[in-house]
Image: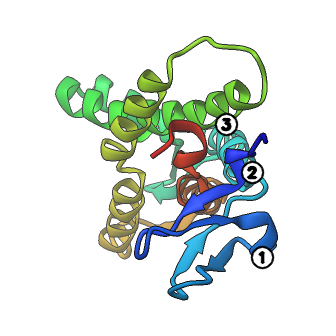
Amino acid sequence: MNVDTENIIECANCGLFVDKTKVSTSTILKCPRCNSKLKAHINECFDALFYAISALMLFILVNIYPLIDLSFTGLDLQTTLIGTVGALFSSNMFFVAMIVFFTIVLMPILNSLIIIMSFIQMHTKLRIFTETLLHDGLKFTQSWTFIEVFILSIIVTYIKLTGMVSSTKFDWGFYILLAYIACFYLSNKKYQGERVFGE
């Protein structure tokens, strides 16, 4: 008799093996013996994939539209996310520029790409990277992504410059950045690593 082990999960509390297709159709089911909650991933959650793709698209827009618009002595100053890194390089602040580029640009992009690639490899026969590399890469990028710190620095800068310049306002890029952070966070929150890496 063949048993579909994909639909069998073990209760962490009492050790009972439960056929999740016969107990519930929700993402959360309860053990029939001890009534503990069990996660039942009957259908792969593609939310993380959609959020990761959306995050990459929004990241492109963030680097097109300026984050903040300043007017100082008749001059209009605007900057984008990647433009901030360029400005730091131009000011010979190479170390700071490299840190900002690594944590604000490179790591978030790689994080979204790893999530997308893991879905591709999970649902196709394509095997470009090993599961270990994807797993370690995802954990590493999650640990070294500080995009939320960057947006806090923008807000602090905005507050400090208020009254010092003719006019200060958040531009479209700032609000796109907020949407980007939301999609980036949700892509990692919704990501079900156990479906890919057996965590």
Q: Visible in this render: residue 115?
A: yes
In this figure, which residue is indicated by the disc labeled 2?
44
* Amino acid at the residue labelled 1: Ser
Residue at x 44%, y 33% (from the top left corner): 135
Query: Which of 24 and 190 lies nearest the eye of the viewer?
Result: 24
In this figure, which residue is indicated by the disc labeled 3?
60
Q: Name the residue at the front extreme.
A: 1
> Mark 3, mark 1: which one is toward the viewer?
1
Question: Marks 3 and 2, Cα distance to the nearest angstrom?
Answer: 28 Å
- Sequence-first disc among 3 and 1: 1
Question: Marks 2 and 1, Cα distance to the nearest angstrom?
Answer: 16 Å
Residue at x 37%, y 31% (from the top left corner): 136
Q: Secondary structure at mark 2?
A: loop
* Amino acid at the residue labelled 3: Ile
Q: Is residue 161 left or right of residue 50?
A: left
Q: Position of residue 15 (x, y in %)?
A: 45, 68
